Image (cartoon, rainbow, N blue to C red):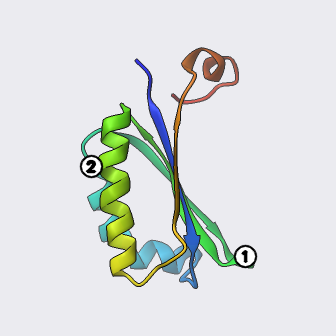
Amino acid sequence: MTTTLLQFDFPFEGPWGPEMTAAFGELAQDIAAEDGLIWKIWTENRAENRAGGIYLFRDAEAAERYRQKHAARLTSFGITGIVARAFATNADLSAITRGPC
């Protein structure tokens, strides 16, 4: 099985840290229920006003469905400059370096 890593990165003015957790708890629950999602790591860079996430999906089709859905959702929030990239994973090499895929 080849999993697919999806990376989102976009301009973000906050909230950050615990305030982000409080503000986006419902969104996190919605994302957790996404078909094909194995896990997500939330990312934030306050110094550069950027946020996003790293997602692992069971396959490329699930990742692409989610990419389209989440890009549309972010756009509806007024976010522009969204960068979304998908990558196939190499499970054998990742296992050597303790990757979770």
Please report the residue visible at 58 percent of the width from the left and 78 percent of the height from the top: 16
Residue drawn 31% across the image and 40% down it: 62
Numbered badge on residue 34: 2
Q: Which mark is residue 48?
A: 1
x, y percentage for residue 101? 51, 28
- Quarter in which the N terminus is drawn: top left
Q: Which residue is drawn at 33% across and 68% down?
A: 72
Left or right side of 39 for 7: right
SS category of the residue bearing label 2: loop
Q: How many labels does the image show?
A: 2
Q: In this view, does 70 lie to the left or right of 82?
A: left
Kindly identify the residue that appears in the image at 54 percent across and 28 percent down.
89
Q: Which amino acid does label 1 sit on?
A: Glu
101 relative to 66 in the view: left or right: right
Residue 87 in which image quadrant: top right
Label 1, secondary structure: give it. Answer: helix
* Residue closest to the eye, 44 or 87: 87
Tell whether label 1 touches label 2 (CB within 8 Å): no
* x, y percent for residue 92: 59, 14
Compared to residue 1, the image places residue 26 above or below, namely below
Q: The disc labelled 2 sits on which kind of residue? A: Glu
Give x and y (percent) for residue 4.
46, 34
Q: How crowded is mark 2: few (under 14 residues within 10 Å), some or many (20 or more)?
A: some
Real-space Cα distance between discs 2 and 1? 29 Å
Of callouts 2 and 1, the N-terminal one: 2
List x then y, in percent, for residue 93.
Answer: 65, 18
Q: In this view, does 3 lie above or below 44?
A: above
Q: Quadrant of residue 37?
A: top left
Nearest the viewer among 83 and 18 is 83
Q: Residue 98 carries which label?
A: none
